[in-house]
Amino acid sequence: MGASVRPSFSEGLGGEQGWPKALRGRGPQAVSGILTALGRAGLWSPRRQLLLATWQALSRALVTMDAESLLLSLELASGSGQGLSPDRRASLLTSLLLVKRDYRYDRVLFWGRILGLVADYYIAQGLSEDQLAPRKTLYSLNCMEWSLLPPATEEMMAQTSVVKGRFMGDPSHEYEHTELQKINEGGKVFEEEVVVQIKEETRLVSIIDQIDKAVAIIPRGALFKTPFGPIHVNRTFEGLSLSEAKKLSSYFHFREPVQLKNKTLLEKADLDPSLDFMDSLEHDIPKGSWSIQMERGNALVVLRSLLWPGLTFFHAPRTKNCGYIYVGTGEKNIDLPFML
């Protein structure tokens, strides 16, 4: 990523105001060296101890997880007025590193943030070596303590489809829904109103699964399929060209294919089976549900979903840097077909 795209680490943690002048604009390795030297010289304080611990964690995060992509994702999300405080950003980077270690994931991605009326849900996902294997989803209310969510089921999807409106921000909150159920007694069938309790945690699982299937994105070539079936990260991927980055056909849904299975052999003739094994965005319905913009002097391409407002994907052409983040209320724009 070019200099115009990569934020300095103090900027990525919420701006350089309040940071010592010697630390501004520097990377985590340089900051760790400065703070360690201050400690050896006896110029120590609790604040410097906290800074040192944070920056050392950031240094390790750069090697073991997508820290740079995370900072850029948060920066893009903050452009819509939904940024994170410096404390939250530092907590997020360090806690996700611990999640990766404790759960032994191959990669940990910060999925995003679902805004609630009382509190917000911070969502992360753990990926195994097979990138299209079912992802493990975790949530947190404070960016430090993470809880594992159960996998989504058809029963969950049907149960939560009747719930509308904003999230509360309390996993134990229960929504009440009244529905008619047929009851058979003594050979007679009659309908009775039954109040059904739906937990917000169940709704959270359902919404995350819907967003993943509809708008999670990855650029063509970032993953490759081996002859034996597993999907791996493509270490030779050097990014899309500028012309390719402007086309929807260069981006795939980050999930198991659905439309690809319905294509004829003639339609599959020009596809590379090791790269074109997922559904392309160009066939999404409704047509026009994606917004593509070039930013920072064509150094960054940004895709935004109009179907699920709050989903932002970025890619720096000719580099490996890419990612997506969702920051929204968890509500689908069902009026989109009438707005296009």
Image (tube, helix red, strand yellow):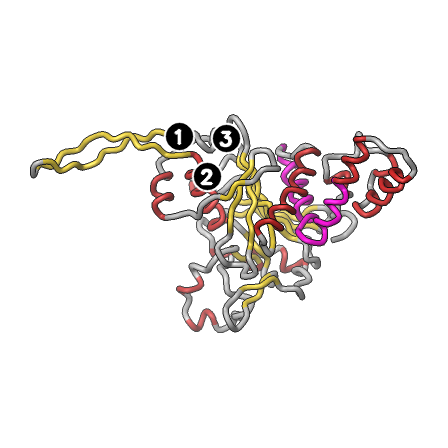
Residue at (61, 37) in percent of width and height: 143
Q: How far apart are marks 3 and 1 (CA)?
A: 11 Å
Query: What are the residue bounds of the magenta stretch?
Result: 54-81
Residues 268 and 138: in front is 138
**Secondary-structure class at tag 1:** strand
The residue pinned by badge 1 equals: 174
Q: Is residue 327 visible?
A: no
Q: Is-magenta flag for residue 5? A: no
Residues 241 and 165: in front is 165
Q: Which mark is drawn over residue 85?
A: none
**Secondary-structure class at tag 3:** loop
Identify which amino acid the numbered label 1 is placed on. Answer: Glu
Q: Which mark is drawn over residue 169?
A: 3
Where does residue 92 sit, x and y in percent of width and height?
Answer: 65, 40
Among the two numbered marks 3 and 1 on one chain, the one whose residue lies closer to the N terminus: 3
Q: Distance between the residues labelled 2 and 3?
A: 10 Å
Where does residue 126 sit, x and y in percent of width and height?
Answer: 56, 51
Verify CB contact (< 8 Å) between mark 2 and mark 3.
no
Residue at (44, 37) in percent of width and height: 201
Q: Residue furthest top?
A: 118
**Image position of 51 (left or right of 223):** right
Magenta stretch: dominant SS? helix
Where does residue 152 sit, x and y in percent of width and height?
Answer: 42, 47
Count residues near mark 2 (Cα–Cα under 10 Å), then give few for <14, some for 14-19, many for 20+. many
Q: Which mark is drawn over residue 204?
A: 2
Identify which amino acid the numbered label 3 is placed on. Answer: Gly
Count residues near mark 1 (Cα–Cα under 10 Å), then give few for <14, some for 14-19, many for 20+. some
